[in-house]
Structure formats: structure tokens, C-alpha cells
Image: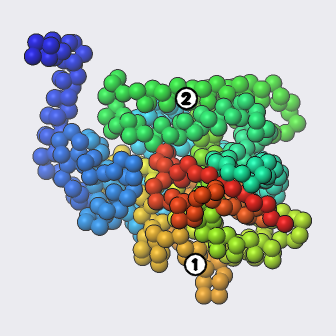
């Protein structure tokens, strides 16, 4: 008891207990006070933890869908002290992000991203800085070849290197993460103007750091920091994450330095050069949004998001065709019928490859790669009869749209028929929203679509993918994805058998 009393008398402990009591008092006062406005319904929050006891921290999206069955498509959750409005199902999500796109356009201040980006960059910035940086980035991407034939040439060139790398295993097992190298290199071509050799030390370092950052972003301890940032002194995950991010920044700064030295006025070769040129153009202005912190933050956002999403989707695609070999054979037969012998598939071929196109879309629907990215209201507003004050955090659940039983016949099954009509022709579905909706939709959507189609068809043209020896299709695990910032497949092995 004496030791415990001594512990309680420590100044740090006293300050922490006082702070905790203040939060409890504030919480109880606000929780019991009747709101002057009609808020969405939701479960009763508990002191301190709110509704966290109702959530599976590793799969918040699935917990949210269960709660929606009781409280409806628009409801309120309490993440600790933070009130959050959740939107589920295609109709509610579309109404918010498309019909009320300006009202739901902002991002909330999420503690870890505030620590990383300090309000800069493309994804978690708001206001004029976000609008200007996004507009400039979209323009730069088009100028550099995204959405044009040049982009396809990059991908086909990289496909050759990827195929040679897969071939080097000579049919022996290799990790699914081997596929990450090619989509990552496409992002680096766009950002830095040149691809990396797969054995380049800088390339391998970046792959490792991206992996470690993404894993840490999915850590329960990182979620705890976001829910209770005042506990940061006692937590460690966010500190390790910030160290990893700084290592990535060091590489970005080095590439920016090389870009400045290489620029000679004969055209821009990369997004980094475009940013530097814009910064130099604004040099004489009193204020510019293209300062070094925003440049580095924007490149960092694209390094992380531009590599992880497409690379992970490609892993899932190969895993799923290993799981369902009949589907793989049908894709390969369609490739044989459409693609000229001795040629790589082209992006234009997708218009004639209805089943293959349906498979790629179904992969993206089935895996629900990015369950949600929070928004917040930019003004006081009414939504579906509820009042949402300015700054209200909103979670539009993309998982609930991609698994919405009103729009998908078998939402929890991998079924390419979701995207085929009675004649076997590919059909678009309005509830297919892996790239989100509205003004905050994915900027790299056209690039990601081209990468997925060309890499997937090119690989299945050259190889048949099978489980490693001793593993059956039934053993391949689809049900428990590895929770990082995205939902990755569990680490598994594949074998690639060359095709004639």
C-alpha cells in the first residue's frame, strides 16, 4: 500500500489523474445534457470508452455493418470522446458524397495524420490548400501521361520485368508480396521520373518502409492513440511510425535535391519536378501553398497510397484465381481468343474481354480493400432529418456499399457474375465504389484501373498460378485478412507454372 501511495504522489501521475477526472466530468456533463438538435440514433455510450466495446478494432467495418442492422443506415457512434456519424449502404453513402459533396468534402483532424503531415499534402488537408494541391496534382498527372498511351507503355515495360522476375523462381514457391514491386515502380516512375531495379537498395528500403508504415497504421495501439491522443506519452506505436515516416522523407528529400539539379528547362519528367517548377514559379509571391512542407507531404501521400492499394489488390487477384482455378482457366481462354499471339494484352482489349473485366471488378468488390476514410462536415447542415454541426466526423462505409445485399446477389461470395448480364457481357454497377465518390474520390483511379488490367492479364497470359506443394485450394485463406491501413491477404505462397 505504501508503494502504491508513493506512485500516486508522483507529479506525472497526479497530472494524469487530474486530466482523466476532468475528461470524465466533461463527458458525463455533455452525455447527460439533452441536445438542442436531433442527432442520428445510436447505442448509449459508456463513460471514457464510448462505444468502443461494441467494435472489433481490427475489423471496424464489419462491426459497423452489424450495428446498422439495429440503428439504420445513419447512426451515431462514440469513439472514446469523439462523436462520429456513420453512413452505411449505397443510398446513404451516395447521397452524402455526391448530392452533398461540398458539405462532406473535408477531412477531420485525425491525431496520427496531424502528427505526420501537419495539415499538408493531398489526402488529409482541407480548404484552399487541399483544393489547390489536388487540382495541380491532377493536371500534372495528365501532363505526365496518366490516362494516355504513355502510361500504358510504362506499365507494359514494367510487366516485362515482373514476368521475368516471376519466371526466375522456376515454378518454386514465392511470396505473394513479390507482386508489389511492379505497381510500386509505376508510382515511382510518376513521382521520380525513373523506375528502380528490383534489387536497388533504395527501392528495397522504400518497399520495407511502406510495409512497416502500413502495418503500424493498422495497429490497435495506433487506434488507441487516435482515440486518446493525450495518452501519447505512454504509447509507443505512433512514435515508431513517425520514425519510419521520417526515413521515407529522407529519401524524398534526396530525390528532390537530384530533381532540382537535373532540371534544365527541357520539359518536366516527374511529379517531383512539376512541384519544384511550381514552387520556383511562385517564388516572388508573398504567400505560396507550394512550400517545402507541402511538397514533401504531397509526395509522401502518393508514395504510400499510390503503392499500397494497387499492389495489394494485385496480390488478392492472384490469390483468388489460385483459389478458383476454373475462373483462372476461363480468363486464360479469353486472353487466348482476344490477344494476338506474341503480343501483350492492351488496355483497349478490356472492351472485348468481358469475363476478365468482370473478374477484376469482382476482386475489388469482394476484398473491400479500404473500408472507409473519414470525412467531416464543412458547414452546419441537415442530412436525412438530422442536424450535423460543422466539423462532425463522418464515416462513409465503403464496405457496406460493396457488400450491400440490395445491389449484389451474393455479396459475401466471390462471384464475377455480379458484373455480367445474361449474355455474358460486362455491365457497370453503380454500387461499385472502391475508389470512393464525390470530390474526394481517388485521384489515381485511371492509373490503378490500367495497372490492374494489364498486370493481371499479362501475368495470366504467361503463367498458371497454383498453391505451393502440399497446399490445396481449400487451404488458401480468404476470410481473415491482415489488417493494416488496407485489408491485405494473409502472407501466403504461390507457384507460377509457365504457359506455352
Answer with left or right where residue 449 lies relative to residue 371. Answer: right
Q: How is the image coloured?
A: rainbow
Q: Is residue 45 above or below residue 497?
A: above
The single residue placed furthest to the left in the displayed view is 1
User: Residue at the spot x=60%, y=84% of the render?
Assistant: 421
Q: Name the N-terminal-most of marks 1 and 2.
A: 2
Instruction: Rate crowding at label 2 as few (under 14), some (14 to 19) or many (20 or more) other CA atoms within 10 Å.
Output: some
- The reply, left or right, for residue 392 in relation to residue 81 is right
Residue 470 image position (x, y, % from top left)? 60, 58
Q: Can residue 132 be spotted in the picture?
A: no
On the question of residue 58 being in view, the answer is yes
Residue 202, percent from left and from top:
71, 30
Image quarter of residue 251: top right
Q: Does residue 154 appear to the left or right of 17 in the view shown?
A: right
In terms of secondary structure, where does tag 1 sit? helix
Q: Give the number of the disc on residue 417.
A: 1
412 or 117: which is nearer to us?
A: 412
| Category of crowding for the residue at label 1, using alpha-carbon neighbours closer than 10 angstroms: few (below 14), some (14–19), many (at least 20) | some
**Rounded to the nearest whole Å, what is the CA distance between mark 1 and mark 2?**
42 Å
The residue at which mark 2 appears reads as 244
Residue 165 locus on image (x, y percent):
78, 47
Depth check: 277 or 6 in front? 6
Amino acid at each position: 500500500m505504501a508503494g502504491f501511495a508513493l506512485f500516486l504522489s508522483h507529479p506525472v501521475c497526479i497530472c494524469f489523474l487530474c486530466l482523466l477526472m476532468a475528461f470524465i466530468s466533461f463527458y458525463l456533463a455533455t452525455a447527460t445534457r439533452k441536445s438542442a438538435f436531433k442527432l442520428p440514433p445510436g447505442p448509449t455510450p459508456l463513460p471514457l470508452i464510448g462505444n468502443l466495446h461494441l467494435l472489433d478494432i481490427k475489423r471496424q467495418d464489419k462491426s459497423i455493418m452489424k450495428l446498422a442492422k439495429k440503428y439504420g443506415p445513419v447512426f451515431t457512434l462514440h469513439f472514446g470522446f469523439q462523436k462520429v456519424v456513420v453512413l452505411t449502404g449505397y443510398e446513404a453513402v451516395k447521397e452524402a458524397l455526391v448530392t452533398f459533396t461540398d458539405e462532406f468534402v473535408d477531412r477531420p483532424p485525425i491525431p496520427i495524420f496531424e502528427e505526420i503531415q501537419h495539415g499538408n499534402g493531398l489526402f488529409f488537408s482541407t480548404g484552399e490548400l487541399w483544393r489547390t494541391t489536388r487540382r495541380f496534382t491532377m493536371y500534372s498527372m495528365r501532363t505526365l501521361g496518366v490516362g494516355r498511351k504513355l502510361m500504358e507503355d510504362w506499365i507494359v515495360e514494367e510487366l516485362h520485368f515482373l514476368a521475368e522476375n516471376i519466371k526466375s523462381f522456376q515454378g518454386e514457391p514465392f511470396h505473394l508480396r513479390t507482386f508489389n514491386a511492379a505497381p510500386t515502380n509505376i508510382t515511382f516512375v510518376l513521382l521520380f521520373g525513373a523506375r528502380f531495379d528490383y534489387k536497388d537498395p533504395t527501392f528495397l528500403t522504400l518497399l520495407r518502409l511502406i510495409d512497416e508504415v502500413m502495418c503500424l497504421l493498422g495497429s490497435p495501439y495506433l487506434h488507441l492513440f487516435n482515440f486518446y491522443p493525450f495518452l501519447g506519452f505512454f504509447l509507443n506505436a505512433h512514435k515508431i511510425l513517425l520514425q519510419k515516416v521520417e526515413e521515407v522523407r529522407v529519401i524524398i528529400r534526396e530525390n528532390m535535391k537530384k530533381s532540382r539539379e537535373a532540371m534544365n528547362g527541357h520539359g518536366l519528367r516527374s511529379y517531383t519536378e512539376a512541384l519544384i517548377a511550381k514552387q520556383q514559379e511562385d517564388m516572388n509571391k508573398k504567400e505560396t501553398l507550394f512550400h517545402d512542407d507541402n511538397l514533401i507531404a504531397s509526395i509522401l501521400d502518393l508514395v504510400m497510397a499510390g503503392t499500397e492499394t494497387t499492389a495489394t489488390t494485385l496480390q488478392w487477384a492472384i490469390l483468388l484465381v489460385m483459389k478458383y482455378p476454373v475462373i483462372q482457366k476461363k480468363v486464360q481462354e479469353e486472353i487466348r481468343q482476344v490477344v494476338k499471339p506474341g503480343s501483350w494484352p492492351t488496355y483497349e482489349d478490356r472492351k472485348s474481354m468481358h469475363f476478365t473485366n468482370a473478374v477484376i471488378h469482382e476482386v475489388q468488390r469482394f476484398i473491400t480493400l479500404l473500408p472507409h476514410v473519414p470525412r467531416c462536415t464543412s458547414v452546419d447542415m441537415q442530412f436525412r432529418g438530422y442536424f450535423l454541426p460543422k466539423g462532425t466526423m463522418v464515416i462513409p462505409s465503403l464496405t457496406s456499399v460493396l457488400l450491400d445485399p440490395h445491389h449484389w446477389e451474393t455479396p459475401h461470395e466471390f462471384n464475377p457474375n455480379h458484373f455480367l448480364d445474361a449474355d455474358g457481357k460486362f455491365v457497370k454497377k453503380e454500387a461499385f465504389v472502391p475508389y470512393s465518390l464525390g470530390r474526394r474520390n481517388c485521384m489515381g483511379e485511371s492509373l490503378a484501373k490500367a495497372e490492374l488490367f494489364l498486370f493481371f492479364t499479362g501475368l495470366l497470359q504467361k503463367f498458371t498460378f497454383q498453391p505451393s506443394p502440399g497446399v490445396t485450394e481449400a487451404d488458401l485463406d480468404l476470410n481473415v485478412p491482415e489488417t493494416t491501413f488496407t485489408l491485405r491477404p494473409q502472407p501466403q505462397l504461390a507457384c507460377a507454372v509457365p504457359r506455352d
